[in-house]
Image: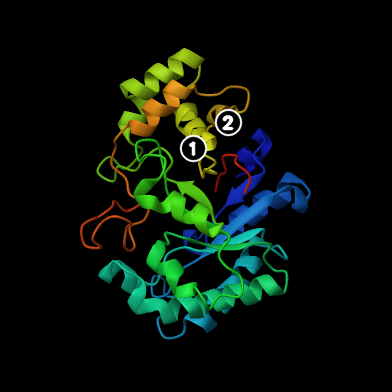
Amino acid sequence: VAAALKAGFTMVDTAFDYHNQDGVGKAIKESQLARESIFLETRVPGCGLDAAVKIGSCYGDTKKVLEQNLQLLDTPYVDLVIIHFPPLGSMVMRTCKPVCGEIRDQWKALEEFYAVGKAKAIGVSNYCASCFSCLDGHAKVFPMVNQVQFHIGMGPDPAGFKSEADKRGVVLQGYSVLGNKPSRQGPDPEILSGNLTSSIAQAHGKSTVQVALKWLAMHGVPAVTKSSSPAHLASDLDLWSWNLTEDEVAKADALKLSGSPSFACNFAGAQESELQPERPQTSAQVRPIIF
């Protein structure tokens, strides 16, 4: 985090269940940057997915964890807090319909946190259409952000998630932006060294990572990225003086690689049991961000 802030990043993304928030808060303090100059995003666990937020007490436990986020980060407010996953039951049944009550209870806690100014914005992660439907007619404030797996090779509207977000006025934010190959414990090699990304990178004098990030930026999707290398961090920010050509965007849009926007529930255009997406790595202006 300290290296990222020094490189020029202005957004930090973390989570209660990453167990690194005290370190994140310390790095922000030691940077001596004004708190208002940093966009700080954090997450609370979905109901039943962490011992801190138990099924049956989603509302009360979420309220406690929200306050613990502030304490660990040593800040009076966060710029964005999101629910990390839909409730546990959605992952078993591949739909949020049976767990709407838990979704509404947890969202109520975020709305109250937002209402008193402890979060400047609130959102969700890994939510699909059935999860949002649970909030229709119940939410006082609708989710502002939905963070999902999104990378080159998934198409510009994976499983309809982008169009659903646009229709609802929700910002879609991407994680696993270099792909996610659990068997390799890292990014998709086709993104890092494949023929298409390599040829585009060579044409612009950039890296394949920059090509992957630029593709997301040109589709209006903020990207969550990370690196411990100062050189890589600097190159991640070098996205604004060049563009992909229309032909390059079209070819990148048509690239087919593995990846699904959420591993929690149902997908547009498919039966809920048909898709078994890969589990993402644990690791809103359109700029790459880091945790």
Identify the element where label 2 is drawn: helix
Q: Residue placed at 61% from the left, 53% from the top?
A: 24
Closer to the camera, 220 or 290?
220
Q: Residue placed at 69% from the left, 68% from the top?
A: 118
For residue 99, which quarter of the picture? bottom left
Which disc number belongs to residue 122? none
Closer to the camera, 127 or 30?
127
How packed mark 2 is, by other alpha carbons closer than 10 Å (few <14, some 14-19, many 20 or more), is: few
Q: Does residue 17 lie above or below 134 as drawn?
A: above
Residue type beneath disc 2: Pro
Identify the element where label 1 is drawn: helix
Q: Residue placed at 54% from the left, 83% from the top?
A: 60
Can residue 95 be seen here?
Answer: yes
Q: Which of marks 2 and 1 precedes in the sequence?
A: 1
Residue type beneath disc 1: Leu
Residue picked out by circle 1? 216
Asked whether disc 1 touches disc 2, contact meaning CB atoms under 8 Å apart, the reply is no
Quadrant showing the N terminus: top right
Q: Is 98 situated left or right of 19 in this image? A: left
- Spot occupied by residue 42 in the image (x, y as percentages of width and height): 57, 59
- Spot occupied by residue 20 in the image (x, y as percentages of width and height): 53, 57
Can residue 283 be seen here?
Answer: no
Q: Does residue 242 lie above or below 283 as drawn?
A: above
Residue furthest out toward the bottom: 56
Q: CA distance from mark 1 to mark 2?
A: 22 Å
Residue picked out by circle 2? 230
